[in-house]
Amino acid sequence: MTEKVLGLKCRECGRQYPKEPFHVCEFCFGPLEVDYNYEAIQKSISRESIEQGPESLWRYADLLPIDGEPTDGLNSGFTPLIRAKNLEAVLGVEALYIKDDSVCHPTLSFKDRVVAVALSKAKEFGFDTVSCASTGNLANSVAANAAIANLNCFIFIPADLEMGKVVASLVYAPTVVGIAGNYDDVNRLCSEIAGVYPWAFANINIRPFYAEGSKTFTYEIIEQLGWEAPDHIVVPAAGGSLITKVGKALKEFHTLGLIDKPQTRIHIAQAEGCGPIVTTVKENSDFVKPVKPDTIAKSLAIGNPADGIYAAATVQDSGGYGEHASDDEIIEAIKLLAATEGIFTETAGGVTLAAAQKLIESGRISRDERIVISITGNGLKTIEALDSRVPEPHVIQPQLNAFRKLMTTL
Ligand SMILES: Cc1ncc(COP(=O)(O)O)c(C=O)c1O
Ligand SMILES: [Zn+2]
């Protein structure tokens, strides 16, 4: 087959670059993006060829930027798309689906998708050390996958992350560095480190490759809906990469003739305490004003999002909208999803459901259209958020009488 990846291309000025671990245009400082040869890909891809592929995100390998066979994340992706009947009844909508990446293998968030591609690519480039700046989930995934691949691993996180996120990196025995600052400080420091140490930083120097892994979240939704795009999708954003790739995935499947022209409205969800991209969408602007994060949704706490303007443009071009969620709304939405669909999501999932509720109530999402809510992370990693927000267990003596007595009080 002819080369499916032509190289990298600047999103701003279109200048082309070879397939190398670069992420910024030397001329205009625009971000680089993987440039595919869709004509060549179209010759080898079909619905059938995808359906016969592995039960992992690698069934879409033709649209992922690695040269050889995938070597990482071989069991990642391929998560359930759940018809959420109970939640439909509560929200008063007709066709609601949950894409559930809270059970993505191996580290229970959608970041296992991006890391599958990032580490496969890092090995092709010959790196022996991988790293990342992370709000938690990416750290967990890079650490786990580095352990599997026998790569050295350095993790950089804000020092005040949730215990579940910190332990779920430490357990794989990478070097974990907690920075006294927020994610934007961590990211700035990592950009400097990446200039000095010859490491593959998943979301810095190999970001163009890493980001492509996010597309598989949307490819799967389309395939699971019987090769149809939904009418609405609600997506959480931090750096804005995932939501940008929702737009790219929809376009690519149409370009390749796998689906009809999608009419999907892409809606963005962020916390009130860190929602710079949603603010851009609400103000219908093309500028993202950085903020200082203050929210319980720590995984989404990026005040100066790398892909902010592209994320906002993705939403605006699709006819979608955005909503902020307050800390209380996040917690209520976490509890609602658990009580209706049995899914325990982390704070980011609470943000997404809370935003979806507002979009439905305001009429931005029609009640009779097909809606997908993106659940991207697992609640067991952010249990602090529910401190004193769920009742204490009833503690009794191990005697039937004690239980009978309890029953009279319930
Ligand atoms: C659970 C979860 N959902 C969504 C996101 C947002 O991803 P992006 O930075 O691609 O916007 C993150 C980022 O860390 C995350 O951890
Ligand atoms: Zn450029």
Image (cartoon, helix red, strand yellow):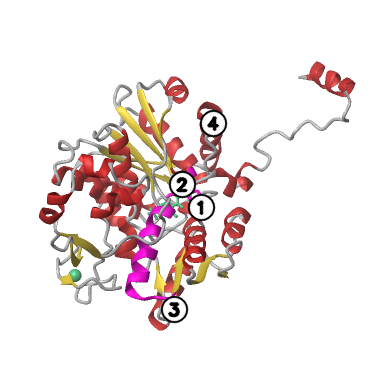
Which mark sits nearer the N-terminus, 1 or 3? 1
Marks 4 and 2: in contact by CB < 8 Å? no
How far apart, in angstroms, are the residues tagged by discs 3 and 4? 42 Å
Q: Amino acid at mark 3?
A: Ile
Depth check, mark 4 against mark 1: the one in front is 1
Q: Position of residue 306 (x, y in %)?
A: 34, 62
How far apart, in angstroms, are the residues tagged by discs 2 and 1? 7 Å
- Pointer 3 local density, CA inside 10 Å: few below 14, some 14–19, many at least 20: few
Q: Amino acid at mark 2?
A: Cys
How far apart, in angstroms, are the residues tagged by discs 4 and 1? 19 Å
Res 13 quadrant in image = bottom left
Tell me, yes or no, whether the highlighted magenta stretch contains residue 109: yes
Which mark sits nearer the N-terminus, 3 or 2? 2
- Badge 3 is on which residue? 193
Classified by dominant secondary structure, the portion drawn in magenta counts as helix
Res 392 quadrant in image = top right
Q: Amino acid at mark 4?
A: Gly
Q: Residue at left 33%, top 65%?
A: 207
- Badge 2 is on which residue? 104
| Range of residues picked out in magenta | 103-128
Q: Residue at left 43%, top 27%?
A: 84
- Badge 1 is on which residue? 107
Which mark sits nearer the N-terminus, 2 or 4? 2
